[in-house]
């Protein structure tokens, strides 16, 4: 099913109505053949599931259709706050719905916009449900910063995010919260309570892991957590959900055991499983129900349902059931690092501990928790390392040490303290839980900052080709799931992908979709044409090169390359005669003139997106890789009227 989803997202264009009809018929036929032909049943079911995955992804992509901005907008913006977080630069960022833009009809107005607040913003304290007004800049969600890179347009499409931007003028309150989002308002209130009871250093961390509110996270602490492979502690995912539900399950069984009549007559194990599912559902709601948290809740629910059905709770089958449910509910998640890393870690842990069972002598009783933490961290770290390196371009050298020192504190102190604060709140004693939580989180941050200060804590890794990670995934799954010596076959694709990764070719020249940033590869690394501006593109280019340098450092590198000329500003372009001997001309202005070189002006870049030029002269654009898809305006969503016509949908002129 996952392969079918990946196939859909890799298509060069949206399928037509006729093609969708053929796919639906093929899926139905494969299901029927699987039911009828018992000898070939697994093969036909595999085909049916793969096609069904593609169909699910297509349905989901069309279901999320919403208006997107198609031009740069500056003017008044009115909307209701539905999310508060932090931008990459540390600014408070608001996601607004019920959006109103000047001189724009409701059929063209984005369903949601996201605005970063800069400048003096003391006029308003952001709160979920608050209706605000501001004057700001908005633009359409940008495409990949380089061909084959992370596609923010696709991510924004599935968030129904039609525009992003910023303001430097004060945001003001237009109307008080309408309370139509009581859960979101409660989450915001809970975040404020947490921060009021804890110091700034740990309060933002606590709010992030309980309510999902990252708006007050300290950037220095976040950098330290990333460098030590502890950033997973910030995401409300499998670890947090597993710790919480495990504590409730174990605590309930222990409580029932104190009453022999209850323990001997009632199915206490199953009652504890129901209570654990209820606790997980509550945590899901309070934390904001992000996709990572939904994924974790599905996984623990499947596990506890297995307990209710007297089946093995933790097995590869339960992982497969959880993955299937998530692919049905949100097939687009298979493309994201969260899904990939979460299931890589889970499969590795389940398969690893099953393989080790009975093969090694048991450790002394007092050392078993430590051995378990070390083994778990090693297995999960090894399984997620390729995905982390591919998506985030770095590998932590001391991640195992940091996790061994931090994860037990999260399980033994932080999560129990959060539960204690909740239980003691009606008595006015929640400060006890928060004090213990402050100690636990302070320990974790100290570990992260200390380990991150050690020599060369990370190695930067070049981004692999698109097929390399898929090949490694297939090999890893085969190695984990197969039995006996037959599993060694999985090492072949892993080794091949490692060789291909090591030989990854990076573009000689990169051009941003704005025409304002150009990067040329040199012996020292990629040299950039400016020390500031287009910071997101610059950072991603350098990271994808496996280069940890800052933009200002890259801008100081000497370029012994006269094949490309970058021109900024209208006057400079008008004053330029020809191409000044360059092979390529890049400008952030429209250029209507004919020149003796290949020109990448603003008009061309708006159509093509970012550009990569390789040493052999091959030119590759972002639009060539992404194709004509729903999320980049290259195709129109299917409607009921589409089925009355054989015409392939396209954007309106």
Image (cartoon, rainbow, N blue to C red):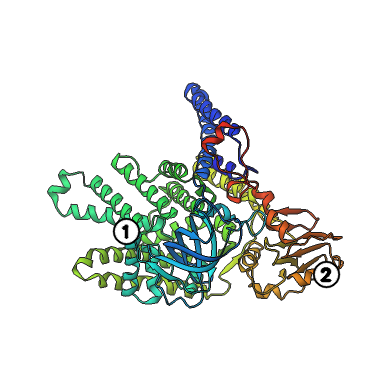
Viewer-proximal residue among 397 and 374: 397
Which labelled disc corresponds to residue 576?
2
Residue 311 pos. (x, y %): 33, 40
Viewer-proximal residue among 183 and 206: 183
Q: Work out whether residue 487 can be spotted.
A: no
Which residue is located at x 52 percent, y 33 percent? 46
Residue labelled with disc 1: 182
Q: Nearer the viewer, mark 1 or mark 2?
A: 2
Q: Work out whether residue 430 can be spotted.
A: yes
Which residue is located at x 72 percent, y 58 percent? 603
Viewer-proximal residue among 546 and 110: 110
Sequence-first disc among 1 and 2: 1
Give the quarter of the image for residue 12: top right
Residue 371 pos. (x, y %): 40, 60
Q: Which secondary structure lies at badge 1? A: helix
Q: Which secondary structure lies at badge 2? A: loop
Which residue is located at x 53 percent, y 55 percent? 156
Give the quarter of the image for residue 14: top right
Q: Residues within 10 Å of mark 2 (few under 14, many from 20)?
A: few
Task: Say if 63 sits above or below 364 in the image.
Answer: above
């Amino acid at each position: 099913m996952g392969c079918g989803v990946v196939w859909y997202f890799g298509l060069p264009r949206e399928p037509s109505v006729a093609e969708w009809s053929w796919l639906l018929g093929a899926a139905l036929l494969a299901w029927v053949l699987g039911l009828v032909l018992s000898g070939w049943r697994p093969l036909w079911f595999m085909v049916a599931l793969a096609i069904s995955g593609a169909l699910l992804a297509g349905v989901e992509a069309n279901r999320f259709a919403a208006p997107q901005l198609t031009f740069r907008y500056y003017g008044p913006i009115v909307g209701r706050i539905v999310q508060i977080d932090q931008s990459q630069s540390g600014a408070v960022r608001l996601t607004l719905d019920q959006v109103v833009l000047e001189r724009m009809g409701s059929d063209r107005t984005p369903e949601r916009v996201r605005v970063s607040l800069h400048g003096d913003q003391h006029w308003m304290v952001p709160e979920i449900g608050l209706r605000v007004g501001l004057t700001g800049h908005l633009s359409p969600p940008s495409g990949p910063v380089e061909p084959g890179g992370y596609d923010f347009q696709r991510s924004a499409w599935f968030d129904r995010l039609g525009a992003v931007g910023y303001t430097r003028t004060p945001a003001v309150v237009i109307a008080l919260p309408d309370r139509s989002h009581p859960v979101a308002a409660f989450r915001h209130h809970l975040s404020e309570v947490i921060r009021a009871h804890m110091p700034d250093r740990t309060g933002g961390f606590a709010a992030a892991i309980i309510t999902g509110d990252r708006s007050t996270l300290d950037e220095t602490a976040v950098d330290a957590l990333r460098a030590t492979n502890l950033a997973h502690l910030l995401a409300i995912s499998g670890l947090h959900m597993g710790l919480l539900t495990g504590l409730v399950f174990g605590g309930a069984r222990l409580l029932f055991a104190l009453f022999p009549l209850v323990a001997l007559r009632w199915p206490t194990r199953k009652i504890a499983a129901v209570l654990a599912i209820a606790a997980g559902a509550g945590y899901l709601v309070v934390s904001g129900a992000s996709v990572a948290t939904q994924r974790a809740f599905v996984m623990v629910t499947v596990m506890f349902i297995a307990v209710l059905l007297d089946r093995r709770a933790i097995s590869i089958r339960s992982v497969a059931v959880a993955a299937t449910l998530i692919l049905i509910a949100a097939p687009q998640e298979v493309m994201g690092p969260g899904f990939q890393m979460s299931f890589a870690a889970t499969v590795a842990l389940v398969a690893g501990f099953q393989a080790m069972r009975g093969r090694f002598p048991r450790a002394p009783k007092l050392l078993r928790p430590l051995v378990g933490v070390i083994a778990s961290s090693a297995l999960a770290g090894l399984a997620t390392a390729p995905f982390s390196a591919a998506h985030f371009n770095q590998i932590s050298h001391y991640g195992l040490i940091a996790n061994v020192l931090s994860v037990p504190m999260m399980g033994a102190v932080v999560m129990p303290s959060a539960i204690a604060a909740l239980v003691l709140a009606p008595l006015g004693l929640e400060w006890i839980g928060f004090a213990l939580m402050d100690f636990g989180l302070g320990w974790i941050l100290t570990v992260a900052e200390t380990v991150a200060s050690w020599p060369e804590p990370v190695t930067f890794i070049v981004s692999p080709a698109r097929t390399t990670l898929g090949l490694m995934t297939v090999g890893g799954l085969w190695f984990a799931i197969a039995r006996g010596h037959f599993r060694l076959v999985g090492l072949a694709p892993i080794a091949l992908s490692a060789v291909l990764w090591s030989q990854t070719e990076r573009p000689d020249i990169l051009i941003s979709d704005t025409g304002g940033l150009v990067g040329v590869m040199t012996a020292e690394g990629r040299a950039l044409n400016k020390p500031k501006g287009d910071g997101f593109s610059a950072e991603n280019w350098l990271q994808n090169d496996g280069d940890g340098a800052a933009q200002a450092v890259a801008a100081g590198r000497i370029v012994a390359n006269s094949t490309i000329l970058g021109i900024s500003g209208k006057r400079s372009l008008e004053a330029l005669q020809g191409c000044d001997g360059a092979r390529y001309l890049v400008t952030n202005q429209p250029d209507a003139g004919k020149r003796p070189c290949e020109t990448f002006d603003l008009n061309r870049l708006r159509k093509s997106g970012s550009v990569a030029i390789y040493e052999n002269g091959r030119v590759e654009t972002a639009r060539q890789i992404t194709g004509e898809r729903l999320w980049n305006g290259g195709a129109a969503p299917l409607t009921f009227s589409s089925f009355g016509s054989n015409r392939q949908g396209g954007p309106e002129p």
